[in-house]
Image (cartoon, rainbow, N blue to C red):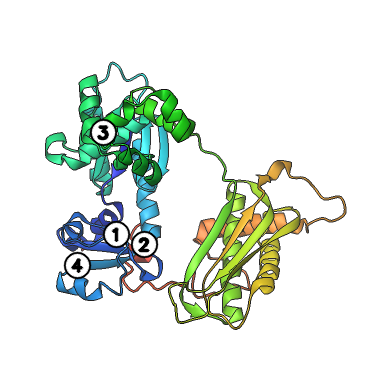
C-alpha cells in the first residue's frame, strides 16, 4: 500500500504554529518581493482571495476583510518540513519526499499491523511535535493514494484526516467522484481533449482502451490509466543528483546599475557552487541571464542569456564567479533596467571522476578553501563567510515587509517563555 501525506495549508500552518493569534484569522502568504499570493488559509479561500492575486491590487481588500499578510519565510518552512519528514521516517523506512509539504510512503510488510491505527498515531505525533495538521490518503498505487488524500482532506469530519482505499467498490466510487481535470498528472491539454470527447470523470478515463490511451496520451498516459485501475506502475523514486542547478531571483526594484547586478550574479554563482559541492558534482557549463520587467509596459524590454564552457569541470565558487562575471559583461546593456537575473550550472559530472584538462589546471588550493568555507558556514551559520564581491549586509535583496521570525533556526528568534 502507498500513502500520500500532505501538510494542510503548509505555509499558513507554519506561521500559525508560532503565532497563535493567526489561527482563526484569514491569512495569506506572499511570494518573493511580496509580489502575489502563493498560499492561503481556508478562511482566506472562503473569502474569495484567488491564488496568484497581486498584493498591490488586493492591499485594501486585505485591510477591509482583516486578512493577515506574511512574506514567504522559506527558512522557517524548510526547517518545519524537515521535522515532518523525519517523523514520517519513524513509521516506515520507505519515504519519498515529493515536495516541501508532501511525501509518498510505502507500507510493505505491514499486513499484520492495524494500518488505520498506525496512521492515526503518525498523524497525532506530527501534529503534537510540529503543530502542522496533515491529511493521509492510502491506496494500492501512488495515483490512487493521491485521490485518497483528496478525499481525506475534502471530508475531514468523516475521515478524521485519514482515508484508506481498500476495496474495489471504494476505488470506483472515488473515480466517479473525481473530475477529469483533477486527476494527478493528467495535464490541462489532455483534460481539455478528454472533456471535448464527453469524458468528465476519472472513471470514464479508465474505461478507454489501452491502445487509444497510448496512441493519444503516450506511455505516460497509459501508466496513469493503469495506476487508476489499481495496477502499480510508479514506485518510490530514489534520491538522485540534479542534472542542472540554478539560482535565480527577482529584484526588489528595477536596476540598471552594473555593480548592483554584478553583486547579485556573484551571489547566485556562489550559491550554485555550494549546491554543487553538496551533491559532490562539478559543472562544465554556466548560463547567466538578465531580464527586464515585462509587466512594466511603459519601459523598453530586454532579455538575454549566454552560456560559457568552463576550461575544466569545477565546483569552485571562485571559478564560477569569474565565469558568471564574464558572461554578465557580455549581455549587460546599460540603457535597460533589470528586474530579474539568474545563474544555472549544467553539464554536471561526479566530482570524484571528473575529466582533467591536459593543458590547464584549476588552482589546487581552491578545493581545500571551498571545504573550509563550507565547514565554517555549516558551523557558524549560512553566509557567515562571504566572498568579496558579495554584499556583506544582506543575503537576498528582496522586499519582505511582512516577514515573520526564523523561530526554529536562529537563537535570537527563539520564543521566550516567562
The location of residue 306, given as percent across then percent down, is: 66, 64
Mark 4, secondary structure of its residue:
loop
- Residue assigned mark 1: 51
**Location of residue 290 with respect to 231 vertically, above or below:** below
**Location of residue 216 with respect to 259 vertically, above or below:** above
Could you say which disc has been placed on residue 3 in the image? none
The location of residue 239, given as percent across then percent down, is: 51, 38
Residue at 27% x, 20% y is 113
**Is residue 113 among what the camera can see?**
yes
Mark 3, secondary structure of its residue:
helix
Along the polypeptide, which appears first: circle 3 or circle 4? 4
- Residue assigned mark 3: 148
Do callouts 2 and 1 mark residues in contact (Cβ within 8 Å)?
no
- Residue assigned mark 2: 73
Residue at 60% x, 62% y is 270
Give the quadrant of the N terminus: top left
The location of residue 238, given as percent across then percent down, is: 50, 34
Question: Please, which residue is most extreme toward the top here?
Answer: 112
C-alpha gap between disc 3 and disc 2:
30 Å
Task: State which mark lies toward you, 3 or 4.
Answer: 3
Task: State which mark lies toward you, 2 or 1.
Answer: 1
Task: State which mark lies toward you, 3 or 2.
Answer: 3
- Residue assigned mark 4: 67
Do callouts 1 and 4 mark residues in contact (Cβ within 8 Å)?
no
Give the camera-side residue of 361 and 345.
345
Residue at 26% x, 35% y is 201
Amino acid at each position: 500500500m502507498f500513502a500520500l501525506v500532505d501538510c494542510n495549508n503548509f505555509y499558513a500552518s507554519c506561521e500559525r504554529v508560532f503565532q497563535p493569534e493567526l489561527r482563526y484569522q484569514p491569512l495569506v502568504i506572499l511570494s518573493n518581493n511580496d509580489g502575489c499570493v502563493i498560499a492561503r488559509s481556508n478562511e482566506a479561500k472562503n473569502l474569495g482571495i484567488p491564488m496568484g492575486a497581486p498584493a498591490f491590487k488586493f492591499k485594501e481588500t486585505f485591510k477591509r476583510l482583516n486578512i493577515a499578510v506574511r512574506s514567504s519565510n522559506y527558512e522557517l518552512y524548510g526547517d518545519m518540513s524537515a521535522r515532518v519528514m523525519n517523523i514520517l521516517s519513524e513509521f516506515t523506512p520507505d519515504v519519498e519526499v515529493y515536495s516541501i509539504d508532501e511525501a509518498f510512503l510505502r507500507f510493505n510488510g505491514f499486513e499484520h499491523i492495524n494500518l488505520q491505527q498506525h496512521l492515526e498515531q503518525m498523524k497525532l505525533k506530527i501534529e503534537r511535535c510540529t503543530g502542522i495538521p496533515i491529511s493521509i490518503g492510502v491506496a494500492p498505487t501512488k495515483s490512487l493514494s493521491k485521490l485518497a488524500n483528496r478525499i481525506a482532506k475534502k471530508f475531514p469530519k468523516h475521515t478524521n484526516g485519514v482515508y484508506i482505499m481498500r476495496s474495489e467498490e471504494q476505488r470506483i466510487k472515488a473515480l466517479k467522484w473525481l473530475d477529469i481535470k483533477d486527476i494527478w498528472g493528467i495535464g490541462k491539454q489532455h483534460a481539455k481533449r478528454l472533456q471535448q470527447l464527453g469524458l468528465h470523470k476519472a472513471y470514464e478515463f479508465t474505461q478507454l482502451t489501452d491502445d487509444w490511451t497510448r496512441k493519444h496520451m503516450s506511455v505516460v498516459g497509459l501508466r496513469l490509466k493503469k495506476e487508476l485501475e489499481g495496477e502499480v506502475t510508479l514506485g518510490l523514486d530514489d534520491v538522485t543528483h540534479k542534472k542542472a542547478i540554478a539560482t535565480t531571483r527577482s529584484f526588489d526594484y528595477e536596476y540598471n546599475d552594473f555593480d548592483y547586478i554584478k553583486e547579485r550574479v556573484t551571489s547566485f554563482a556562489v550559491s550554485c557552487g555550494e549546491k554543487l559541492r553538496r551533491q559532490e558534482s562539478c559543472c562544465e557549463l554556466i548560463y547567466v541571464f538578465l531580464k527586464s520587467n515585462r509587466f512594466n509596459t511603459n519601459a523598453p524590454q530586454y532579455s538575454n542569456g549566454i552560456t560559457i564552457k568552463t576550461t575544466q569541470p569545477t565546483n569552485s565558487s571562485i571559478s564560477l564567479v569569474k565565469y558568471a562575471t564574464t558572461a554578465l559583461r557580455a549581455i549587460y546593456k546599460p540603457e535597460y533596467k533589470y528586474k530579474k537575473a539568474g545563474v544555472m550550472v549544467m553539464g554536471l559530472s561526479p566530482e570524484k571522476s571528473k575529466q582533467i584538462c591536459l593543458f590547464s589546471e584549476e588552482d589546487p588550493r581552491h578545493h581545500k578553501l571551498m571545504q573550509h568555507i563550507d565547514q565554517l558556514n555549516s558551523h557558524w551559520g549560512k553566509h557567515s563567510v562571504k566572498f568579496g564581491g558579495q554584499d556583506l549586509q544582506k543575503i537576498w535583496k528582496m522586499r519582505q515587509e511582512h516577514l515573520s521570525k526564523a523561530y526554529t533556526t536562529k537563537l535570537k528568534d527563539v520564543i521566550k517563555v516567562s
